[in-house]
Image: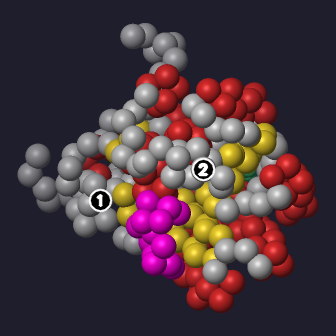
Amino acid sequence: MTADTPVSFGFDDAALAALPLVYQPGLFDGQVVMVSGAGSGIGKAIAFLYARLGARLVICGRDRAKLDACEAWLRRLGSPDVLVQPTDIRRSEAVAQLFDAAYQRFGRVDVQVNNAGGQFPKAALDISPKGWKAVVDNNLNGTWFMMHEAAKRWRDAGKPGSIVNIVLTFQRGFPGVAHSCAARAAVTYLSKTVAVEWAPYGIRVNCVAPGVIESSGFAHYAPEARAKFSRGNPMLRHGNVQDIANAVVYLTGPSGDFVNGELLNVDGGGILWGELWTIPKPAYFNAGQTP
Ligand SMILES: CCCCCCC/C=C/C(=O)SCCNC(=O)CCNC(=O)[C@H](O)C(C)(C)COP(=O)(O)OP(=O)(O)OC[C@H]1O[C@@H](n2cnc3c(N)ncnc32)[C@H](O)[C@@H]1OP(=O)(O)O
Ligand SMILES: NC(=O)C1=CN([C@@H]2O[C@H](COP(=O)(O)OP(=O)(O)OC[C@H]3O[C@@H](n4cnc5c(N)ncnc54)[C@H](OP(=O)(O)O)[C@@H]3O)[C@@H](O)[C@H]2O)C=CC1
């Protein structure tokens, strides 16, 4: 491999589509599932799994080409119908249009998975005000606009619903991604708050925190950082996108009926042991150590 060789991470589409199922086919027959960021990585894996379980899908992201490619697979995998609606989740009016289109097409949404998001690695001291705002806007405000719209429609229709927000393992802090750590902690406690406020409407709200999951998202990190990602948990390996998809389905299927306001870490134990640097590790932390 040369320095110019494009690198891809995680399963290709055909491999993803053929992974063994741990849930019963038909589990989501008749249901409509909305997945943001479904054009790549974890979001695509989540959409594939729901399609294989019989759900109709509403998929969004900003890049139509990626969404169209995903749609073709979803239909092939057995989803009876798919709505593709390019949407920037940071724009509340675009989010409202997404829901208008979904209700017009299907008359319902049963499950919402807020997976869209991301950040860039940078030492906290070097994050510009614009960069800070971009990450908080994407991960906190965008997720809120999506949840808020979903819940309003469920309340007004007198229908139950289930939300899962994809965050990250923020519990020990996260050097190199302070902006995202702050936004994801906020989403988690927002979720716990509305899990109580919205329980009277039959709405459950949970979060899944991925640890290091080998996906297209890896491309945003330097090779030197990536090389050490597997040291970030006691299992000494990466997780895969299906680990996250299975966790999301667990929470939104009958298996999760009595789970509400929870944060499920899918990180190989990374919040207990291991260190994860998305930026170069300061020499300070090696001082006094034997090699
Ligand atoms: C954190 C967990 C680490 C565990 C191990 C790693 C495993 C992977 C974890 C993942 O989360 S994978 C998912 C990764 N995917 C993404 O992060 C994709 C999404 N990211 C983005 O879209 C951007 O990073 C964004 C900033 C969140 C959104 O960008 P937006 O389109 O709003 O902004 P821009 O116009 O591009 O930039 C605005 C502003 O932000 C600053 N900035 C953006 N990118 C960078 C960068 N790469 N480096 C430094 N600064 C950046 C910058 O100030 C931009 O303003 P300008 O300077 O361009 O005017
Ligand atoms: N992989 C990992 O190890 C970890 C991932 N995560 C989180 O999991 C989620 C998925 O990441 P992953 O699949 O790995 O990485 P990707 O970069 O492949 O996925 C990010 C997705 O979010 C979408 N997205 C980003 N911003 C917006 C926006 N404003 N509006 C709509 N869609 C948007 C992108 O779609 P498009 O390009 O079409 O806009 C893309 O499909 C992210 O929230 C990520 O931070 C958390 C911890 C670890």
Looking at the image, residue 215 sits to the left or right of residue 56; the answer is left
User: Which segment did they paint magenta?
Assistant: 250-264
Horizontal and vertical percent position of residue 241: 44, 42
Residue sitting at 58 percent across and 76 percent down? 204
Q: 8 and 69: which one is in front?
A: 69
Q: 146 and 272: which one is in front?
A: 146
Q: Quadrant of residue 39?
A: top right
The amino acid type found where label 2 is placed reads Asp
Asked if one can make out residue 30 in the rendered structure from this viewpoint, the answer is yes
Residue 69, compared with residue 98, is above or below; it is above
Horizontal and vertical percent position of residue 282: 35, 54
The amino acid type found where label 1 is placed reads Gly
Residue 96 drawn in magenta: no
Residue 252 drawn in magenta: yes
Looking at the image, residue 236 sits to the left or right of residue 259; the answer is left
Looking at the image, residue 156 sits to the left or right of residue 245; the answer is right
